[in-house]
Amino acid sequence: MLTGAGISADSGVPTFRGTDGLWKNFRAEDLATPEAFERDPRLVWEWYNWRRELIATKQPNSAHKAIVELERRSPNFWLITQNVDGLHRDAGSQKLSEIHGNIWKVRCTGCGLVENNRNVPIAILPSCADCGSLLRPHIVWFGESLFVEDLDCCSRALRQCDVLLVIGTSGVVHPAAGFASIAKQAGAFVAEVNLDPTPQSALVDISLQGRAKDLVPLLLDPA
Ligand code: OAD
Ligand code: ZN
């Protein structure tokens, strides 16, 4: 399973693209790149703090919950999510790669220590309890590579899966944008759930249009 911001849209978390998307009002270059953090860490932290405040009020929805049940029922299940909101974990998902990181984790720019931090608001600027260096969000920003262990895990899952379900992603951010085609080439049946057609729609075996919260639970009880 591969998920994107669309699955959390049904919990009230804003998506990135589209008419109400975050990238309509904010420039990714100013907020979600290592250069932006170097230039103005306070601005970047204020933006992440605003998102923390927003996400802290949101709950997993029926689609997140259905995915937990699919994990329980399927011995070789794996979930790859681009979402950093932590709602899959909150719902109970355990077999997952959060390939873009997690907004509730911080990483030390000095010693590299990764820690959970659910402070809302978080102290700006936050510093490492161990070495005193500046902490950054444990998020994979534009221009940064995925963590090697996540890449390995994803490529194994995509090459071995019989079925890949792609939910609520615009399919334009790499490397996740290439995952459907990797699975397809490896012989998987690929299905997509999205409100709208996407660049992936032509490639997949079946493209279902609708809300994740309505369609994903149907997988549990197709009759
Ligand atoms: P996008 O905002 O690009 O796309 C969200 C997709 O969800 C769109 O295709 C919508 O049509 C669809 N959608 C919206 N509401 C839906 C609903 N209720 N049910 C089903 N589908 C719905 O989000 P992502 O594809 O996740 O990176 O974006 C990928 C990455 O770009 C993000 O992880 C983020 C961003 O910059 C980082 O945070 C590093
Ligand atoms: Zn440190």
Image: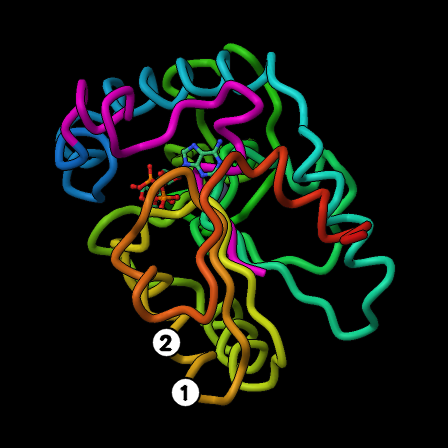
Relative height, residue 157 to residue 48 (above, below) = below
At 66% across and 66% down in the image, what residue appears?
A: 78
* Residue that numbered label 2 is attached to: 181
What is the count of numbered marks? 2
At 43% across and 50% down in the image, what residue appears?
A: 100
Identify which amino acid the numbered label 2 is placed on.
Ser
Q: What stretch is highlighted in magenta?
A: 1-27
Q: How is the image coloured?
A: rainbow
Q: Residues within 10 Å of mark 1 (few under 14, many from 20)?
A: few
Relative height, residue 107 to residue 184 (above, below) = above
x, y percent for residue 54: 49, 13
x, y percent for residue 190: 50, 70
At 37% across and 30% down in the image, what residue appears?
A: 15
11 in the magenta segment = yes
> Quadrant location of ligand 1?
top left
Say which quarter of the image contains residue 178. bottom left
Gap in angstroms between the C-alphas marked 1 and 2: 6 Å
* Residue that numbered label 1 is attached to: 185
x, y percent for residue 146: 38, 62
Label 1 with label 2: CB-CB less than 8 Å:
yes
61 relative position to 183: left or right = right
202 relative position to 192: left or right = left
Identify which amino acid the numbered label 1 is placed on.
Gln
Say which quarter of the image contains residue 175. bottom left
x, y percent for residue 47: 32, 19
